[in-house]
Amino acid sequence: MTGTHGPAQRGIGLPAAAITFGRLDGNRHPNVGALLADYDKDSPGPDIVCTGTMIDAKVFLTAAHCTAYLDSIGIERVWVTFAPEYDEDSTSRAGLFAGGYVSHPAYGSGGAKDPHDIAVVLLDKSPGLAPAQLPTAGLLNRLKSGHELRERTFTTVGYGTVRETKKTGPHAFFFDGKRRFVTQSALNLQPSWLLLSMQPSTGDGGTCYGDSGGPHFLGGVNSDLLVSITVTGDAMCRATDKTYRLDTPSARKFLDNFVTLP
């Protein structure tokens, strides 16, 4: 969701938080990376801003509120790391992939109905990773109309701060820069949004600050079908993930500029 490093949705503005009640990802999702920028003067290396996923050889998908934040502070060049663990105090650029970002041109308009909260980073060099698969048009609508949506599992991946206890509110968050994953179930489908449960009492985890732009894969932990990205949710990261759909005409029109759509 917006994070703590940048603007305050689930990705920016607070101190970065991440997957709640999840497990270490290791190499399960190698095409999921952390978006980095050198914006914190107290940190010697590039800092984690948000999460994202490769959707083509050199195209990295993330959330527009992440890139808009960087634009607002004058940062144009960014890096992406795909390491399962990233040390923000490292000054080495080894293993980092540089690039420039493109935010949806309509981001900031459309209100809550469709915030156009989608962006890409165009990498200078391909990391050589198999990209995630994008959904066909209206896929989630078809699952809902067929009464299948609530029965499906969604796998979510992200970097940032972590929560492993139901108690103590935000004081339970900690950060270690490791990629984690968690499974979730669907709550509701809206024209631009897929709402996912993150209730630990029902076996779901979720995202939090620092996970913005990260993927929600339709299916179990081995799925690479990317159907929505993290954008926002409740402040305590305990109830609902509000994720931006990728199967809508609006999202597909933007993505069509950079990748071949299914």
Image (tube, rainbow, N blue to C red):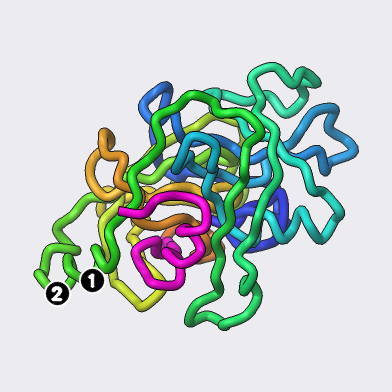
Which x, y percent locates residue 237? 49, 57
Lateral position of residue 67 relative to residue 238, left or right: right
In the image, taking residue 154 as reference, residue 51 lies left or right, namely right
x and y percentages locating residue 81 in the rendered image:
60, 29
Image-based side of 117 in relation to 196, left or right: right
The answer to which quarter of the image holds residue 192 is bottom left
Q: Please name the residue that numbered disc 2 is placed on.
A: 145
Neighbour class for label 2 at 10 Å: few (<14), some, many (≥20)?
few
Residue 138 magenta-highlighted: no
* Pointer 2 with pointer 1, Cβ within 8 A: yes
- Amino acid type, callout 2: Ser
Of residues 65 and 203, the one drawn nearer to the viewer in this rendering:
65
Secondary structure beneath disc 2? helix
Which is more toward the observer, 111 or 181? 111
Q: Which residues are magenta?
A: 239-262
- Residue sitting at x 62%, y 60%: 64
Instruction: Give the residue pinned by disc 1.
Output: 141
Give the amino acid at mark 1: Asn
Residue 17: x and y, percent? 59, 46
- Compared to 196, does 170 lie above or below? above
| Quadrant position of residue 13 | bottom right
Q: Is residue 167 visible?
A: no
Image height of 109 relative to 65, above or below: below
Q: Residue at x 62, y 35 (%)?
A: 175
Give residue 60's position: percent from left, percent from top. Answer: 54, 43
Label 1 packing within 10 angstroms: few (<14), some (14-19), many (20+): some
| Residue sitting at x 34%, y 76% | 190
The residue sitting at the left extreme is 146
Mark count: 2
Q: Is residue 253 magenta?
A: yes
Numbered disc 1: secondary structure: helix
Look at the picture and state if 129 lies above or below 72.
Answer: above
